[in-house]
Image (cartoon, rainbow, N blue to C red):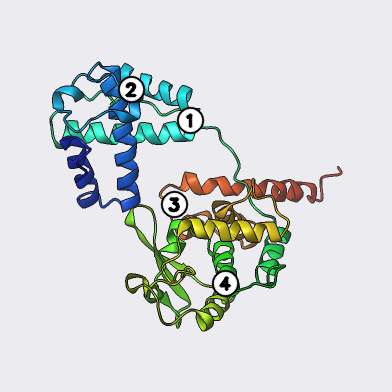
Amino acid sequence: MVKEYPEFLNSFLQYSAVILNKSQNSIKEYGYDLSNFFKFMSNHLGFSSEEDIKDTDIHSLDISFLKQITLEDIHSYLYYLKGAYDSKPATLARKASTIRIFFAYMSNKEKELEVNPAQNLESPKLDKRQPKYLTLEESKKLLEVSIQPNCDGKNRNLERDFAIVTLFLNCGMRLSELVSINLKDIKFDECKMTVIGKGNKERTIYLNKACMKAIQQYLDVRQKTGIKKEDESALFLSERLERISKRTVQYVVEKELKKAGLDTSKYSTHKLRHTAATLMYQYGDVDIRALQELLGHKSIATTEIYTHVANAQVRDAVERNPLSDA
């Protein structure tokens, strides 16, 4: 329960956590998105008149407030986000999705609303952009420099950082999945691990020789004592001897990208996930369904963005047709 939230929002968040089994990250995002939406609506509909919408008190709002919201009001909110924050289509689409889910809950589950104002709410059209990824040569270069000491000779976390880069490039896992790995999740005799992906869904990731070697090299030097009690099970530790944070991993990847002479404005932890998927599809003859399973994608359409790498191969195959010069 968040005391700053109205009762109906807390009820929705509890339902999402317990019944829908949403992750804590998803719950936080729902709460953030919807509280901002209600703050805007409170001012938009005349329930409050704060000069800065962020200062709006929404905890006392009730169902009568929700009943006044229309589809046009929701459109006004999305227009406000685009104008005030230059929100991108992907951001607006996520917020629109959250609003739809909330009002569906209030209409169908709680039955507090006879009319669902978000029933016909459309998502902003997204640009179909190809994912950025490292080439095979760039990936090899990144791995090569990651196992080398820094210019200043300091290499306190050399094995840890190399293992992080190796897992990203070989397994295509998400940042959130990597930081949450526990020692017990790794089955060394079977060369595999389990991770918790989006929606609290567990999936298996198989570890090749490079991953197994990198993990073992790190475990050989990983601190054994002095670890924060609640983080003793964590695979990757920070210098403060607690579970490594997402921000620290992002810093590690950025540092190694710079060492490899790669553009850090183009590449990130998520781009390494793209790289793993692209290289597996391009060089590994991986079936698209198998790749979907490996990446933990809910929809095959999400996985299909990696098939763009086949275009050059298809063109080459056509050119190699013995009848091409006829």
Tell me which amino acid carries mark 1: Ser
Tell me which amino acid carries mark 2: Ile
* For the residues bearing labels 1 and 3, Cβ distance under 8 angstroms: no
Tell me which amino acid carries mark 3: His
On the question of residue 132 being in view, the answer is yes
**Residue 244, percent from left and from top:** 45, 64
Structural distance between the alpha carbons of marks 1 and 4: 37 Å
Residue 155 lies, with reference to residue 128, above or below; the image says below
Q: Secondary structure at mark 2?
A: helix
Q: Position of 63 compared to 145: left or right?
A: left
Structural distance between the alpha carbons of marks 2 and 3: 29 Å
Q: Quadrant of residue 66?
A: top left
Q: Secondary structure at mark 3?
A: loop
Foreground tag (2 vs 1): 1
Query: Which residue has dot 1 on it?
Result: 87
Query: Which residue has dot 4 on it?
Result: 157
Q: Position of 11 compared to 270: left or right?
A: left
Give the number of the disc on residue 74.
2
Structural distance between the alpha carbons of marks 1 and 3: 25 Å
